[in-house]
Image (cartoon, rainbow, N blue to C red):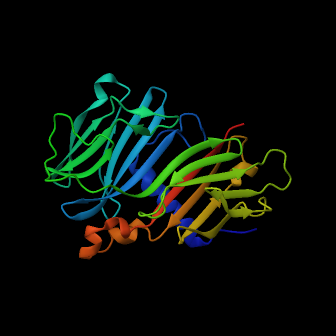
Amino acid sequence: MLQLPTVAIVTMRDFASCLSQSGVQVAHASSPSGQSMVQCAYFVRLRGKPCRAIVTWSKVAMGQALGIAVDDSSGRCLCKTEIKPWLPAKRKGSKAVEVDGGALDIIWDLSAAKFAAGPEPLEGFYIALIFDLEAVLVLGDMRELGDREVYSDALPPSPVMVARKEHVYGKKMYSAKAWFLDAGQLHHITVECDTSGLKDPSLEIRIGKKRVLQVKRLAWKFRGNQTIYVDGLPVEVLWDVHDWLFGSSNGCAVFLFQSGKSMENFLSRSCSQDETEHPSHRFGFTLMLHAWKVE
């Protein structure tokens, strides 16, 4: 039986921990209902110090929910708050929280947001994090902040997403999108695995139309890792489909795609001038998919 190397297991657990501990908990992992959730981690700076801002989009029984958290370089949670935009009065507004002795203003407008099947808006929204009168993170396609000013001379550069965690659903095919290189293209990722009544199921992963990974004899190789290449960049792929094969009918498999160096390595050291000006070139990207089987 193929086992994951210890370092790979630690990477998976650490990434899941860093997002789940700082993000909003949506539902218990044993129940796929109400689990529609996307978490994105962004590189930001507060007073010049590298930090991680985590934005959680979730879909609960009452409607959409939004969570914001900020961690410092040691992983310590500096702040965490939840917004409930299904309430009409909460679709647009602002909230001030104290972070490390400073004032963090969270400004949002979801009143015209357009959603598809998932919890993350496609367009017609903005979220801004302003720390000590400086915009450190702006998301969305609406750059104006309503009747609030952006106190910095200019908006920050395009946000640098360093990690994404997402729940996807299907019977045998699961899809997601991701950039593995800041200057690269957006890739369509497809995971295909049919376990219904098959004695010897196999697993396939495609990037676009190209098959980049195939695992046969999956019952013996339900956990593993392999390096693929995307945009000429090595991407480590880890999978754990144990619950698909040996768990309940609506089990969850976990897939992790990791390119470049982890964010934690960069948060724990000082940056050169070039790295400060171009942070997107310094980070790898991590995508974690929780793939729920729906019968």
Q: Which image quarter: residue 170?
A: top right
Q: Is residue 153 left or right of residue 162?
A: left
Q: Residue at x 18, y 61 (%)?
A: 47
- Position in image of residue 60 (x %, y %): 48, 31
Q: Is residue 160 above or below residue 243?
A: below
* Residue 192 visible within the image: yes
Q: Is residue 4 above or below residue 136?
A: below
- Position in image of residue 172 (x %, y %): 71, 45
**As drawn, which residue projects farthest toward the bottom?**
272
Q: Residue at x 68, y 55 (%)?
A: 241
Q: Residue at x 60, y 38 (%)?
A: 31
- Position in image of residue 223 (x %, y %): 68, 62
**As drawn, which residue projects farthest toward the top?**
88
> Looking at the rendering, in which quadrant would you find the N terminus?
bottom right
> Looking at the rendering, in which quadrant would you find the C terminus?
top right
Q: Is residue 254 left or right of residue 18?
A: right
